[in-house]
Image: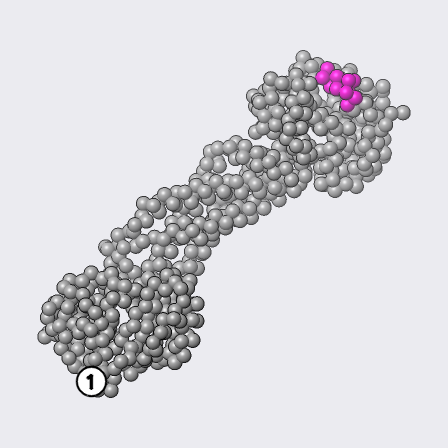
């Protein structure tokens, strides 16, 4: 197969109909850039959903007592053996032990049901608490018996840092514990719902209040979602009496949204590029019909049928490759302009209901570049099949007589 | 007797496309020896172009046998016919039929590229072919930048560069003026006499016939005269 000749002829033929091919190239480039930018948005949304789920005190992997999810309370606590961390594989960004129990918090004016969480503040860089803005003071350590409450809860309770709240919860012995706590600080979270749900205090202080040495969860944050399965498997051996669960099991709604957005990416690609394929086929058929006489002459002077097919395929693939390259370059350029994030604070309330942050950061995934490029080229080759078939069916003599 | 390049036996060609079958060739017997320049002559519809196309493997006879350089053409597949045309036959068409996006040199080289000749050799042979036809100065021009006569000479260069056993020319003078036609015929005569190229021409142009070494007359699809 004379590859050099095919490339030369195809390249020249592309430039032969500049306007028509420029329009086709623009359509391909715009479609590819559009699909690619939509992908960055979808990937950004995916990432946002995942991060929110993971940072929402879940982590990539969590160790819990069986039954805790159905009936959360200190009676579902467990003790941790020394040296359990040796079961952690590489790629662990951090871990945190916590107690999380339901409680009722009361101010002078209001009462609210909340999740009371005992933490070691130094370990909470793995959750939203690590980055949360705090007015007042942060918790100083696991022995700190003051409270850190969310801004929206503070508003609802009509209270502020420095004032006192009363907490009522159930102790390890099953009896009600009630104690007064001073508010060290008020935190702000990107997801507003968290501010109403979680009240933090020191882990040791909460253990003292509840009369236990146990914890209710270990949360583990990894360097990436891809290490989750290995970590879950590794920890399962060390925590035979507990459940070792992934964030997908703990946050099934977020996990299914992530999966749906994955499928949406493919569907969008097929719809946009599929529509474009019709345009490509139409243009290629037109190009073949315009050159019937020339193709007939090529057959007459000895070009084999398969070389004629190859020429049409190379030509359409070259147009597709140019369009895809231009489209990806355009997408990269536009992405660079919004890479730092898009401010969506105007839609804050709506986004919060989806568990999304007000600043939307698109994600440029190299796998999508490969996906779009490879699938586009395959589509280009497939769409050239029909015009190539038309070209090869040309009888040299009939074509020459035209 | 000289070696036979073409041997047609009882060749018929009937077109059944229309309601009434058209018998373009009716039992034609024809032979062409190496080194001859034969013109197939006759009025329109006499079958001269059909016979030329059948011999060139561009059309299949309805009946009969066509042997070109020892190969029975009627039994070949499409790909084998392509190879036959590529390697054994050179074509000169009425409308030149050069590839518009290629220069004169590239058009001539094209055949050698199809044959898989390496770049250095094909460039050298193509330049030599163009040079022999007085086209050295035009090698970088595209067909649209050349006159009809120049394009036809490039088409001849393309046809002879692969050194075919047979050169087929279908009405080669149809689109040329008298002086250009004469130049073209002088050129073909040189190729025939000096290089021994076997040429078969379909024409109704008396000037073309006057140059050929033998004239075969056809009428209503049959050979009615064969004059040396």
Q: Position of residue B132 (x, y in %)?
A: 69, 18
**Residue farthest to the right, as pictured:** B1
Q: Which residues are magenta?
A: B185-197
Could you say which is closer to the camera, residue A123 or residue B144? A123
Give the letter of the chain under mark 1. A
Q: Secondary structure at mark 1?
A: strand
Q: Is residue B191 magenta?
A: yes
Residue at (66, 41) in percent of width and height: A305
**Residue farthest to the front, as pictured:** A83
Q: Position of residue B134 (x, y in %)?
A: 66, 16
Q: Position of residue A148 (x, y in %)?
A: 18, 69
Q: Is residue A13 above or below residue A206?
A: above
Q: Quadrant of residue A291?
A: top right
Residue at (43, 46) in percent of width and height: A32
Residue at (17, 74) in percent of width and height: A145
Magenta: main secondary structure: helix
Q: Quadrant of residue A129?
A: bottom left
Q: Is residue B174 visible?
A: no
In this figure, which colouring scheme has been used for the structure?
one colour
Could you say which is closer to the camera, residue A140 or residue B152? A140
Q: Is residue A311 left or right of residue A97?
A: right
Q: Position of residue B190 (x, y in %)?
A: 75, 17
Location of the N terminus of chain A by quadrant is: top right
Q: Is residue A142 above or below residue B38?
A: below
Q: How many marks?
A: 1
Q: Is residue A245 left or right of residue A202?
A: right
Q: Which residue is mark 1?
A: A176
Q: Is residue A351 magenta?
A: no
Q: Is residue A312 visible?
A: yes
């Amino acid at each position: 197969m004379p590859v050099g000749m095919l490339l030369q002829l195809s390249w020249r033929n592309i430039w032969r109909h500049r306007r028509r091919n420029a329009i086709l190239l623009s359509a391909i480039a715009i479609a590819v850039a559009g699909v690619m930018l939509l992908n960055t948005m979808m990937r950004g949304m995916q990432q946002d959903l995942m991060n929110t789920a993971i940072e929402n005190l879940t982590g990539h992997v969590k160790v819990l007592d069986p039954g805790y999810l159905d009936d959360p309370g200190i009676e579902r606590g467990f003790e941790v053996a020394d040296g359990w961390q040796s079961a952690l594989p590489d790629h662990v960004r951090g871990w945190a032990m916590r107690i999380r129990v339901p409680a009722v918090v009361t101010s002078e004016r209001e009462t609210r049901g909340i999740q009371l969480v005992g933490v070691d503040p130094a370990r909470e860089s793995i959750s939203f608490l690590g980055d949360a803005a705090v007015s007042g003071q942060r918790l100083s350590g696991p022995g700190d018996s003051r409270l850190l409450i969310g801004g929206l809860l503070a508003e609802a309770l009509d209270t502020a840092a420095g004032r006192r709240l009363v907490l009522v919860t159930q102790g390890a012995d099953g009896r009600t514990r009630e104690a007064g706590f001073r508010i060290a600080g008020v935190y702000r979270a990107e997801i507003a719902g968290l501010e109403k749900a979680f009240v933090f205090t020191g882990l040791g202080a909460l253990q003292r209040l509840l009369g236990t040495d146990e914890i209710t969860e270990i949360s583990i944050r990894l360097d990436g979602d891809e290490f989750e399965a290995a970590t879950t498997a590794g920890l399962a051996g060390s925590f035979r009496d507990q459940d070792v669960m992934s964030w997908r099991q703990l946050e099934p709604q977020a996990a299914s949204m992530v999966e749906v957005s994955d499928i949406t990416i493919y569907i969008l690609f097929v719809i946009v590029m599929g529509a474009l394929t019709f345009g490509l086929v139409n243009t290629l058929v037109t190009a073949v019909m315009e050159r019937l006489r020339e193709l007939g002459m090529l057959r007459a002077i000895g070009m084999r049928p398969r070389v004629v097919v190859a020429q049409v395929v190379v030509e359409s693939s070259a147009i597709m490759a140019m369009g895809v390259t231009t489209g990806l370059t355009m997408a990269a350029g536009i992405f660079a302009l919004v890479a730092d994030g898009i401010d969506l604070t105007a839609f804050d309330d709506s986004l919060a209901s989806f568990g999304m942050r007000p600043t939307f950061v698109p994600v440029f995934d190299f796998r999508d570049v490969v996906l779009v490029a490879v699938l586009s080229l395959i589509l280009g080759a497939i769409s050239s099949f029909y015009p190539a078939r038309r070209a090869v069916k040309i009888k040299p003599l009939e074509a020459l007589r035209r | 007797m000289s070696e036979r390049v073409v041997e047609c036996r009882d060749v018929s060609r009937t077109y059944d496309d229309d309601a009434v079958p058209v018998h373009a060739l009716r039992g034609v017997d024809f032979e062409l020896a190496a080194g001859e320049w034969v013109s197939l002559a006759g009025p329109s519809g006499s079958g001269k172009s059909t016979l030329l196309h059948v011999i060139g493997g561009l059309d299949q006879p309805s009946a009969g046998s066509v042997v070109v350089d020892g190969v029975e053409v009627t039994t070949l597949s499409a790909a084998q016919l392509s190879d036959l045309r590529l390697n054994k036959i050179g074509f000169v068409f009425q409308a030149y039929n050069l590839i518009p996006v290629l220069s004169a040199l590239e058009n001539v080289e094209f055949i050698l590229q199809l044959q898989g000749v390496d770049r250095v050799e094909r460039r050298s042979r193509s330049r030599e072919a163009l040079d022999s036809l007085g086209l050295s100065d035009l090698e970088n021009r595209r067909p649209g930048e050349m006159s009809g006569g120049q394009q036809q000479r490039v088409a001849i260069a393309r046809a002879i560069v692969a050194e075919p056993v047979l050169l087929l020319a279908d009405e080669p003078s149809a689109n040329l003026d008298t002086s250009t036609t004469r130049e073209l015929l002088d050129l073909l005569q040189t190729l025939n006499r000096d290089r021994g190229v076997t040429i078969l021409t379909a024409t109704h142009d008396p000037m073309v016939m006057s140059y050929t070494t033998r004239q075969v007359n056809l009428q209503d699809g049959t050979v009615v005269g064969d004059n040396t």
